[in-house]
Image (cartoon, rainbow, N blue to C red):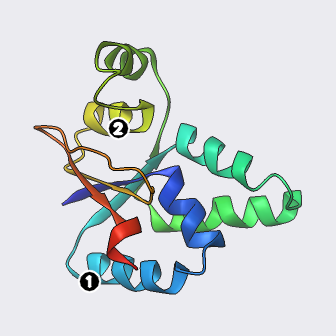
């Protein structure tokens, strides 16, 4: 299964008190042969959320993400168009995931996120409490 890791999940993985639980869930997903993907946009959002750390640590994080994911997708016009057309049901990260053929999106958000017909959203926020 192809899984898109959003900036919210990546930020929680680095900063939250729940990171050990999320690490365990991600390891279980890897053990079941799920493949992880993200995008340059998601990494940009993550690094914005980590603005108070130095450049060396940001480079290390980028290296870890390159190791964790099979591919880091670029932001393109088609993804922007998809998000504009579906603005009420999906954000830009979900639009990238849809365009790239992902089957599932992992998020970690307090608000509820609805799955789409072609994209299952798994919210780790409620699962790790």
129 or 70: nearer the eye?
129
Quadrant occupied by the N terminus: bottom left
Query: At 86% from the left edge and 57% from the top edge, which residue is drawn?
Result: 52
In the picture of the structure, the residue carrying the numbered disc 1 is: 31
Q: Is residue 119 above or below residue 27?
A: above
In the picture of the structure, the residue carrying the numbered disc 2 is: 94
Q: Position of residue 48 (x, y in %)?
A: 73, 45
Quadrant occupied by the C terminus: bottom left
Q: Earlier in the sequence, mark 1 or mark 2?
A: 1
Query: At 43% from the left edge and 18% from the top edge, which residue is drawn?
Result: 80
Q: In which quarter of the image is residue 64?
A: bottom right
Q: In this view, does 15 lie above or below 45?
A: below
Q: In this view, does 93 lie above or below 46?
A: above
> In the structure shown, which secondary structural element does the residue marked by tag 2 occupy?
helix
Q: Position of residue 41 (x, y in %)?
A: 55, 37
Q: Distance between the residues labelled 1 and 2?
A: 24 Å
């Amino acid at each position: 299964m192809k899984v898109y890791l959003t900036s919210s999940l990546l930020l929680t993985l680095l900063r939250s008190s729940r990171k050990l639980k999320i690490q365990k869930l991600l390891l279980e997903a890897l053990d079941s042969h799920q493949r992880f993907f993200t995008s340059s946009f998601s990494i940009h959002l993550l690094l914005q959320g980590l603005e108070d750390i130095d450049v060396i640590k940001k480079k290390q994080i980028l290296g870890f993400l390159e190791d964790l994911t099979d591919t880091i997708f670029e932001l393109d016009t088609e993804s922007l168009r998809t998000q504009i057309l579906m603005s009420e049901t999906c954000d830009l990260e979900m639009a990238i995931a849809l365009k790239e053929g992902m089957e599932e999106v992992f998020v970690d958000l307090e608000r509820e996120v609805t799955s789409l017909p072609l994209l299952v959203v798994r919210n780790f926020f409620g699962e790790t409490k």
